[in-house]
C-alpha cells in the first residue's frame, strides 16, 4: 500500500521554540493532506486540511498562527508549532489522500506520528 | 454535527473472534473506515466500506454495515496476539473530513 513518511517521530523541545514536522507521500501525489492531534487515550482531532498550493483550512478552535501549515508540493506538507508551550505536547499525525484511483477508490494513508514534548 | 461512538475496551482469547462495534450519527456518510493503531504509532488502514454496501470481507476481517441503524462492526476471525491494538472507526461525510470514534482497545489473551 501507499506509504506516508512523517518525521521526526519524537521531538523534545524547550518552551518558546518552534518545531517543524514533515509529512511526505512517498509513492503517490497527495493533493490533500490532513493534520491531526491525539491526546493520550483519546481519539484523533482534525486540526487542519492542507491543499497543495493554497492556504490550509483550520478547524474551529485551532490557532492558525500557532500551527503553521505549508503544502508546497504534491508530496510534502509541513506543520510548524510556533513558540511551543507545554500544553502543545501531544501526538501529531498527518494523513495524505490518494485520489488517483478516482472518487470510489479514494484512500487516506497515515504517517507514523510525531510525539512532541515541550519542557 | 457528526458523532462517532465506540466501546472503550474488548478482551478476547487468542483464537476466538473479536467484534468491535461503532455507531455514528451522520446519515450522509459516504465511506466508513476501520483503522488500527499500535502503541506510539500512526494509524494503519485496515479496511473500509462504501455506504451502499452492507458487508465486506477481507481475509480475517469482516465489516458489517447497518445503515438504517447507523451501526458498523468489525469482526476479526481467529484473533492473534498481534491484533492487540486500538481500533478506530471513522466516517467520511460531506466535506471529505474524517470523524473518528474514541477507539476500542483490544487485548488478546493467550
Image (cartoon, coloured by chain):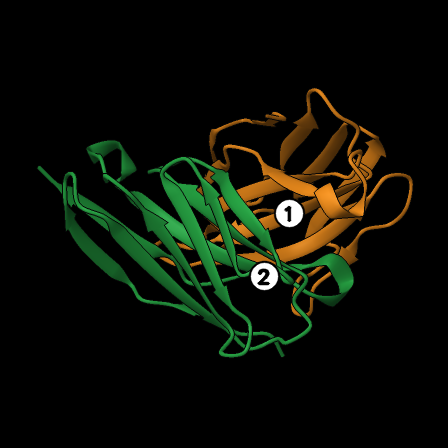
Chain colours: A orange, B green
Q: Examine the image and state in which quarter residue B23 appears.
A: bottom left
- The percent coordinates of residue A44 (x first, y second) are 50, 55
Quadrant location of the C terminus of chain B in the rendered image: top left
Residue A15 visible in the picture: no
Query: Which labelled disc corresponds to residue A64?
Result: none
Q: Nearer the viewer, residue A9 or B47?
A: B47
Q: Nearer the viewer, residue A25 or A82?
A: A25
- Residue A90 located left or right of residue B19: right
Residue A57 visible in the picture: yes
Label 1: chain? A
- Residue B49 located left or right of residue A90: right
The answer to whether residue A59 is above or below residue A84 is below
The residue carrying mark 2 is B91
Count residues near mark 2 (Cα–Cα under 10 Å), then give few for <14, some for 14-19, many for 20+. many
Q: Examine the image and state in which quarter residue B78 appears.
A: top left
Residue name at image x 41 percent, y 43 percent = B36
- The percent coordinates of residue B104 (x first, y second) are 33, 57
Residue name at image x 65 percent, y 30 percent = A22
Count residues near mark 1 (Cα–Cα under 10 Å), then give few for <14, some for 14-19, many for 20+. many
Q: State how far apart marks 1 and 2 are (Cα).
A: 16 Å
Which secondary structure lies at badge 2? strand
The residue carrying mark 1 is A35
- The percent coordinates of residue A97 (x first, y second) are 72, 40
- The percent coordinates of residue B38 (x first, y second) are 35, 38
Quadrant location of the N terminus of chain B in the rendered image: bottom right
Label 2: chain? B
Q: How many marks?
A: 2
Which secondary structure lies at badge 1? strand
Q: Examine the image and state in which quarter residue A93 appears.
A: top right
Amino acid at each position: 500500500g501507499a506509504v506516508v513518511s512523517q518525521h521526526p517521530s519524537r521531538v523534545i523541545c524547550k518552551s518558546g521554540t518552534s518545531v517543524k514536522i514533515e509529512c511526505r507521500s512517498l509513492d503517490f501525489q497527495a493533493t490533500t493532506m490532513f493534520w491531526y492531534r491525539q491526546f493520550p487515550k483519546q481519539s484523533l482531532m482534525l486540526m487542519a486540511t492542507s491543499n497543495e498550493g493554497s492556504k490550509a483550512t483550520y478547524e474551529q478552535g485551532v490557532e492558525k498562527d500557532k500551527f503553521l501549515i505549508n503544502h508546497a508540493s504534491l508530496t510534502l506538507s509541513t506543520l510548524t508549532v510556533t513558540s511551543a508551550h507545554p500544553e502543545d505536547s501531544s501526538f501529531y499525525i498527518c494523513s495524505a489522500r490518494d485520489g488517483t484511483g478516482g472518487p470510489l477508490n479514494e484512500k487516506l494513508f497515515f504517517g507514523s506520528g510525531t510525539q512532541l514534548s515541550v519542557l | 454535527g457528526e458523532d462517532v461512538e465506540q466501546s472503550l475496551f474488548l478482551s478476547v482469547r487468542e483464537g476466538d473472534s473479536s467484534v468491535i462495534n461503532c455507531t455514528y450519527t451522520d446519515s450522509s456518510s459516504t465511506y466508513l473506515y476501520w483503522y488500527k493503531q499500535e502503541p506510539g504509532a500512526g494509524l494503519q488502514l485496515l479496511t473500509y466500506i462504501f455506504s451502499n454496501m452492507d458487508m465486506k470481507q477481507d481475509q480475517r476481517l469482516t465489516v458489517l454495515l447497518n445503515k438504517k441503524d447507523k451501526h458498523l462492526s468489525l469482526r476479526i476471525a481467529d484473533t492473534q496476539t498481534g491484533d492487540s491494538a486500538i481500533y478506530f472507526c471513522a466516517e467520511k461525510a460531506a466535506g471529505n473530513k474524517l470523524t473518528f470514534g474514541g477507539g476500542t482497545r483490544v487485548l488478546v489473551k493467550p
